[in-house]
Image: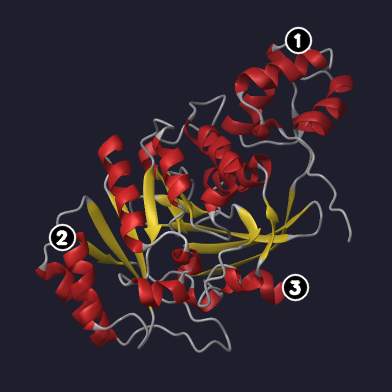
């Protein structure tokens, strides 16, 4: 069995106090940590050689101890006239992960990965079928964000410079299975500049397949982030197969935890539901879902499945999708159908990494 090289510690793995303490432990004044944070989180610059306010003789130390190179771009592919871009990253140990940057009329969103692969084993998901390689560090997750913010500021998307406004933890991996690194990243996102990216907590969404213990921990963070639950079917019998963690946390228990999160935060949660042809898109399942959610502080986000090459799983027929929406609306359950961004660029999480590998 080979031992993986440990990911080098990065500025983004530390809170502001720890950054200053590390600077002093290296013989640097504490204020140097503030300067490094400003360059990284405000100017999206991770190259100390280009910083005029850091002495030349100090830059190599700062680079190696605070800003080691954690991710390297392998390639980018775009669609939607350039408004959707998927980036494939190689981590320091050769592992591949993906992020997706999407520009809309009213916002710019990045979807980021929190694990390389995923251990949840959902059969319709390209990442789930790859299995879990390892957790990402907060530094590796945050690096995806800073790269996205830099691309936005540099005007790399159509329409010129913009600001990265929304973050969704819906890329590769189960965020709540890598809880500490994800929460450090969330703090990096919501902490005002220069110590963080200064994106509002309400613009951050953390997705989970339903790790009840993770949702309960999230409640105690006192953050106004949005919780998204990947439910995919309202009945335990099918969900045991589609989302195997359901064998541990049943639908009723997952919804109870989501309700408690909504009560604690005042935030409506999202039910993610991938519509899969002839599997979970029947009108009777929409009826059951409507009955389950009609008095809950929840919103349903229907997702036409991005098919994986060679897979038996595919998107629902348009008429079945419309009927599903109609049934949910008859229960006054708020429902939207997600914009199918990225289908022609292997949009489903894990497909680009699998193709490269």
Q: Where is residue 212 in the image (x, y as percent from the top left)?
A: 43, 50
Residue 125 position (above or below residue 157)? below
In x, y percent, where is residue 167?
46, 47
Task: Tell me where residue 274 sits by quadrant.
Answer: bottom left
In the displayed structure image, the side of residue 99 where residue 315 appears, left or right: left
Kindly report the distance in space between the C-alpha atoms of the residues bearing marks 3 and 1: 44 Å
Residue at screen point 49% across, 46% down: 161
Q: Give the camera-side residue of 249 and 311.
A: 249
Badge 3 density bin: few <14, some 14–19, many ≥20, Cα 10 Å: few
Per the image, the residue denoted by label 2 is 294
Residue 36, position as x, y percentages in the image: 69, 25
Q: Is residue 48 left or right of residue 250?
A: right
Q: Residue at x 62, y 37 (%)?
A: 44
Q: Is mark 3 on a helix, strand or loop?
A: loop
Q: Do the residues labelled 3 and 1 touch (CB within 8 Å)?
A: no
Distance of mark 3 from mark 2, alpha carbons?
44 Å
* In-image side of 171 versus 232 (left or right): right
Q: Nearer the viewer, mark 3 or mark 2?
A: 2
Q: Can residue 162 be seen in this view?
A: no
| Label disc, if present, on residue 357 of the rendered structure | 3
How far apart marks 2 and 1 lie (CA) works out to: 57 Å
Q: Name the residue under label 1.
A: 29
Helix, strand or loop under label 2: loop
């Amino acid at each position: 069995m080979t031992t993986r090289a440990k990911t080098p510690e990065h500025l983004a793995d530390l809170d502001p106090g720890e950054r200053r303490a590390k600077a002093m432990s290296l013989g640097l004044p504490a204020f140097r940590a503030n300067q490094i944070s400003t360059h990284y989180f405000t100017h999206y610059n991770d190259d100390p050689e280009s910083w005029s306010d850091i002495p030349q003789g100090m830059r190599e130390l700062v680079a190696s101890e605070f800003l080691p190179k954690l991710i390297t771009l392998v390639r980018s592919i775009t669609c939607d006239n350039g408004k959707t871009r998927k980036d494939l990253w190689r981590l320091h140990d050769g592992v591949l992960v993906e992020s997706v940057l999407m520009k809309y009329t009213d916002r710019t969103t990045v979807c980021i990965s929190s694990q390389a692969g995923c251990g949840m084993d959902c059969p319709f998901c390209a990442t789930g079928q790859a299995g879990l390689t390892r957790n990402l560090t907060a530094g590796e997750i945050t690096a995806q964000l800073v790269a996205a913010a830099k691309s936005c500021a540099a005007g790399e998307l159509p329409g010129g410079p913009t600001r990265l406004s929304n973050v969704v933890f819906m890329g590769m991996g189960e965020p709540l299975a890598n809880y500490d690194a994800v929460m450090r990243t969330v703090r990096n996102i919501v902490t005002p500049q220069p110590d963080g990216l200064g994106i509002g907590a309400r613009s951050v969404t953390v997705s989970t397949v339903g790790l009840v213990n993770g949702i309960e921990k999230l409640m105690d963070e006192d953050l106004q982030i949005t919780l998204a639950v990947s439910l995919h079917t309202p009945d335990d019998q099918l969900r045991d197969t589609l989302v195997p963690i359901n064998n541990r946390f049943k639908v009723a228990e997952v919804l109870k935890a989501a309700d408690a999160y909504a009560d604690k935060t005042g935030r409506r949660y999202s039910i993610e539901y991938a519509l899969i042809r002839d599997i979970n898109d029947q009108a009777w399942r929409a009826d059951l879902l409507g009955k389950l959610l009609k008095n809950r502080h929840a919103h349903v986000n229907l997702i036409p499945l991005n098919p994986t090459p060679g897979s038996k799983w595919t998107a629902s027929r348009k008429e079945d999708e419309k009927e599903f929406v109609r049934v949910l609306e008859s229960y006054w359950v708020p429902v939207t159908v997600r914009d199918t961004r990225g289908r022609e660029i292997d949009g489903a999480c894990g497909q680009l990494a699998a193709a490269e590998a």
